[in-house]
Image (spheres, rainbow, N blue to C red):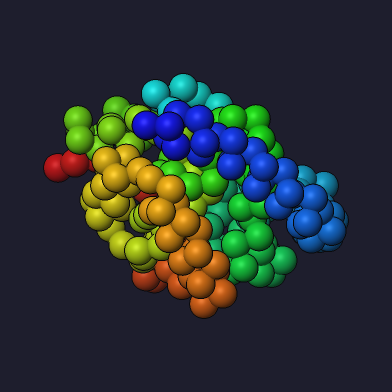
Amino acid sequence: MLYKKIIKRFLDFIIAFLGFIILSPVFLIVTIGLFFANQGEPFFFQKRPGKNERIFKVIKFKTMNDRKDNQGNLLPDEARLTPVGSFVRKTSLDEIPQLLNVLKGDMSLIGPRPLLVEYLSRYNKEQKRRHNVRPGITGLAQVNGRNAISWEKKFEYDVKYVDNLSFLLDVKIFLKTFLKVFKSEGINQKGQVTMEAFKGNN
């Protein structure tokens, strides 16, 4: 398919490049804010599996600090989420640095979200198919519940995207993403600041 093999990557690069230029003032302001909120560490880097499970480093704004208890263990997420970080998460501004991942070719604008490397061994055969395409900043699961739906439902959407990838589907997801961000829907799992870890299929 021409779109999947060539056009999608071309559009990713052009849109990410223009997007980063347009959002550069916001990028700078958030970077400064998080620099002071996180003791000089505005960015968060972590290894994630991409297309065909190739490992790359994802870059995001760091919305939580590294505060620890008396035993040296990190405090719960809700205790480490800074006021600035909370605003950045709520407005999805923490995703802006991933435009750099898109420019590099590690990610796409639209696709299954890149998750933790440790999850690779926990997927079943069907769920593993989510790695048949480049991971995305937003995707079908994100516009259908984001962190408010179960892991199993997320993976169903991810695989559905892989099987139905097209220009029209990408446009639909792209437009719905703006609506979700505007409404701040599905950012957190009910009762939690972040999504509960995926423990595998029982």
Residue depicted at x 41% and y 54%:
168
Of residues 65 and 75, the one drawn nearer to the viewer in this rendering: 65
Residue 201 picture location, percent across and down: 19, 41
Q: Is residue 16 above or below residue 23?
A: above
Examine the rendering and report whether any part of residue 156 can be seen: yes
Residue 163, by quadrant, is top left
Residue 72, by quadrant, is top right
Q: Residue furthest left?
A: 202
Residue 118 picture location, percent across and down: 39, 31
Examine the rendering and report whether any part of residue 151 can be seen: no
Q: Quadrant of the C terminus?
A: top left
Of residues 79 and 124, the one drawn nearer to the viewer in this rendering: 124
- Left or right of 24 in this view: 104: left
Residue 68 picture location, percent across and down: 62, 49
Q: Quadrant of the N terminus?
A: top left
Q: Residue furthest bottom?
A: 183
- Numbered marks: total: 0
Residue depicted at x 66% and y 69%:
87
- Left or right of 201 in this view: 100: right
Residue depicted at x 52% and y 77%:
183
Residue depicted at x 54% and y 46%:
109
- Left or right of 59 in this view: 166: left
Of residues 90 and 118, the one drawn nearer to the viewer in this rendering: 90
Residue 165 picture location, percent across and down: 35, 43
Q: Residue furthest front?
A: 2
